[in-house]
Image: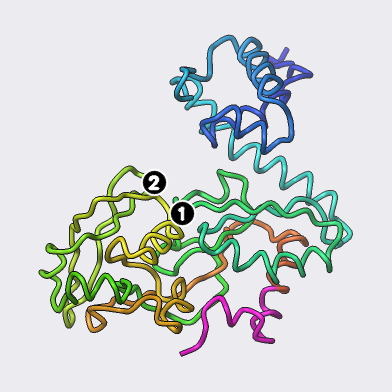
Amino acid sequence: MKNSYIIPRNLLDGLEAFLRVAEQRSFRVAAEDLGVSPSAISQTVRQLEERIGVPLFIRTTRSVGLTEAGALFHAQAAPAFASLVSAWEGARTYGGRPAGLLRLNMPRSVVPILIEPIIADFCDQYPDVDVEVTGEDALIDLAASGHDAGIRVGELLEADMISVRLSPPFRFVVVATPDYLNRHGRPQTAADLKAHNCIRQRISNGAIMPWRLIDGNRSLEIAIKGRVIVNENTAVVALARRGLGLAQVSEPLVIDELRSGALEVVLSPLSPSSPGLFLHYPGHAQVLPKLRAFIDHVKAALATGMLDRLIPPG
């Protein structure tokens, strides 16, 4: 007689709650994502831990972390759950009708630009598709996190991704207000940055992002100094506009400020270029109707010039 394993009827109960808490490292934020109370999601996860027989999270008053068993469970459960969701939605949309939940991941600074008109117009055209937009600057594994597609700059795309260009190439520029430059001087070389207050940015791995410049064919990586550290591009721009110091940002992010004169570019010859922004999605996964509809919608918007304000020409 062959050995058999009877799958518990409640095997998947609490799995989505566990994955959301593991992803957000917060019971409160996970509860908001799922539309339930923190106590409800806490109880759901506790029941899951009881069924498995080991604690999955380390809970303190300040943080939530995964135990060794929790990390192992997450590593295997996340892609499996994503496959189950894909299978469910694939069956649901078998007739080719775009439907289900479309999960998109993109930098926070891109979210307000795409919400109107792209996302809003898409929702009007496809009422059976729900859209969840996650704005975060950290690089993630789309498949493991359950996202259908993402938006990133071209140099950060992985080789197995299929991509759709959203913008032409653009520069990363160092900017400051005219008042700041009048008070502190205009840097002429990369070495001059040492004498300036530079707005620093902490990236997802905890490191401070260096500034990257070019000198002919040579790439420079500058460890800048400054009194303020933030973790998102929009905060960098806001502080630069207040005259706090120099900031390095993508040129499209400050195009309005540059045109109005609120900010000025310095060290322009040293500005490095990026290939541009791309919509990307896993190349090995079947493109469901909901994602195909969104891709086609984005391409149509590009053709009609709807995305010109994302990366204004010239």
Q: Nearer the viewer, residue 196 or 28?
A: 196
Residue pictured at 25% horizontal, 58% vertical: 210
Q: Secondary structure at mark 1?
A: loop
The percent coordinates of residue 140 (x first, y second) are 48, 49
Left or right: 143 as drawn, with respect to 94: left
Q: Magenta includes 299?
A: yes
The residue indicated by pointer 2 is 204
Q: Nearer the viewer, residue 112 or 258?
A: 258
Q: Earlier in the sequence, mark 2 or mark 1?
A: 1
Q: Is residue 78 above or below residue 304?
A: above
Residue pictured at 46% horizontal, 78% vertical: 255
Amino acid on which disc 2 is placed:
Ser
Image: magenta residue range: 298-314
The percent coordinates of residue 283 (x first, y second) are 57, 61
The residue indicated by pointer 1 is 137
10 Å neighbourhood of mark 2: few (<14), some, or many (≥20)?
some
Residue pictured at 17% horizontal, 74% vertical: 185
10 Å neighbourhood of mark 1: few (<14), some, or many (≥20)?
some
Q: How many marks?
A: 2
